[in-house]
Image: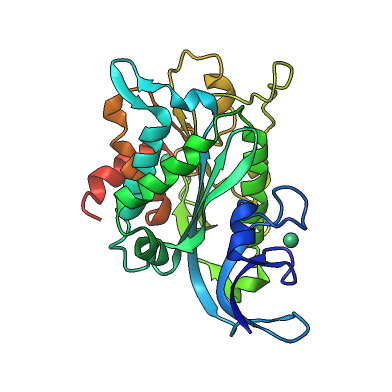
């Protein structure tokens, strides 16, 4: 028997068909909430006892991963900028889609993976873990992806659980970096060399997590504490590296601006600059495209890295 199967990152025995996977927002219903992300394995063989025969072990040495966390709370339906009619969530759907499709000419696209997670008070996978190559086949063009994202984002509209979204992304990121996800076969993340301010060389996995939001934690009037970012504890090869970059849609005078900024670590290359991007004006939105290129190719983390990338590799 052969079936299109979705398998939990925690346990190869937790396997589901496509309909069940979709109904559970691509999270494993047997694992605790948000802990078992489901990965599509395509058709796999299942023996008479219902046990999965693992697919031929793939060997991939050079995987890149970009996880996007999109705020889909009610406030994201408001206009992004004064005198600008587009809502924040429409703007994010458009920017994310254009950004991902701008990478479709990348020769490494079969090794570059994305995972798009939406959150309000609940966390949902909007686009399951897949290579950019597969994503381009599935959605055809940026408009196709934009449409699919909007359709799912519009169904959310609730409160804002940034803490929960970061925990889900952190768990998957650490599993991925540790090469612990057995269903992916034998794999390793691509490693980048990054020179810091003191000309020290660091090896950093080519994994980035981008958080797009317009506010702070809000799960009720008395539940507004934004926890310290779990990414401060992300480890690779015995060292701690923070791979989270945050993009804030709003004004630097908002009450949640400083809280959100406090999540961000300092850039390893520019120790006085936070891994934090403020989008408070339509002219800054063009930068988003650069953000994706940076997250997937060159080794940048902060607005200063982005400026350098835009001047040096304009036509990447
Ligand atoms: Zn599971
Ligand atoms: Zn930097």
Q: How many marks?
A: 0
Image point 28% across, 63% down: which residue?
105
In the displayed structure, 309 sits above or below 42; it is above
Given residues 36 and 17, the one toward you in this image is: 17
Residue 117 lies, in percent from the top left, at 54, 46
- Residue 28 shown left or right of residue 162 in the figure: right
Image point 69% across, 31% down: which residue?
227
Image point 38% across, 66% down: which residue?
133
In the displayed structure, 79 sits above or below 22; it is above
- Residue 256 shown left or right of residue 98 in the figure: right
Quarter of the rendering containing residue 265 = top right
Residue 202 lies, in percent from the top left, at 52, 56
Identify the colour scheme used.
rainbow
Residue 95 lies, in percent from the top left, at 35, 41
Image point 38% across, 34% down: which residue?
90
Q: Which corner quadrant holds the N terminus?
A: bottom right
Q: Is residue 211 visible?
A: no
Given residues 152 and 217, the one toward you in this image is: 152
Q: Is residue 174 visible?
A: yes
Q: Quadrant of ligand 2?
A: top left
Residue 222 lies, in percent from the top left, at 74, 17
Given residues 238 and 260, the one toward you in this image is: 260
- Residue 140 shown left or right of residue 68 in the figure: left
Q: Which corner quadrant holds the C terminus?
A: bottom left
């Amino acid at each position: 028997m052969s079936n299109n199967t979705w398998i939990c990152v925690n346990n190869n025995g937790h396997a589901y068909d496509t309909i069940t996977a979709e109904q559970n927002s691509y999270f494993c219903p047997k694992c605790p909430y948000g802990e078992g992300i489901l990965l599509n394995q395509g058709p796999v063989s299942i023996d008479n006892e219902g046990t999965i025969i693992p697919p031929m072990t793939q060997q991939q040495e050079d995987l890149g991963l970009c996880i996007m966390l999109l705020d889909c709370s009610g406030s994201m339906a408001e206009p992004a900028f004064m005198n600008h009619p587009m809502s924040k969530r429409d703007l994010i759907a458009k920017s994310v889609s254009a950004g991902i499709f701008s990478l479709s000419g990348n020769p490494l696209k079969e090794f570059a993976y994305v995972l798009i997670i939406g959150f309000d008070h609940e966390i949902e996978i909007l686009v399951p873990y897949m290579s950019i190559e597969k994503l381009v086949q599935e959605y055809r063009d940026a408009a196709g992806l934009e449409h699919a994202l909007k359709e799912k984002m519009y169904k959310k509209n609730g409160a804002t659980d940034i803490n929960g979204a970061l925990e889900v992304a952190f768990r998957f990121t650490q599993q991925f970096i540790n090469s612990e996800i057995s269903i992916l076969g034998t794999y390793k993340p691509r490693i980048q060399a990054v020179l810091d301010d003191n000309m020290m060389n660091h090896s950093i996995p080519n994994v980035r997590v981008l958080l797009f939001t317009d506010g702070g934690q809000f799960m009720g009037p008395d539940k507004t504490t934004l926890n310290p970012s779990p990414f401060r504890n992300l480890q690779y090869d015995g060292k701690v590296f923070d791979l989270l970059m945050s993009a804030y849609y709003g004004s630097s005078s908002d009450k949640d601006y400083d809280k959100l900024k406090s999540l961000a670590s300092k850039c390893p290359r520019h120790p006085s600059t936070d891994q934090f991007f403020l989008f408070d004006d339509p002219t800054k939105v063009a930068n988003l495209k650069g953000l994706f290129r940076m997250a997937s190719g060159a080794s940048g983390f902060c607005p200063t890295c982005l400026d350098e990338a835009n001047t040096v590799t304009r036509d990447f």
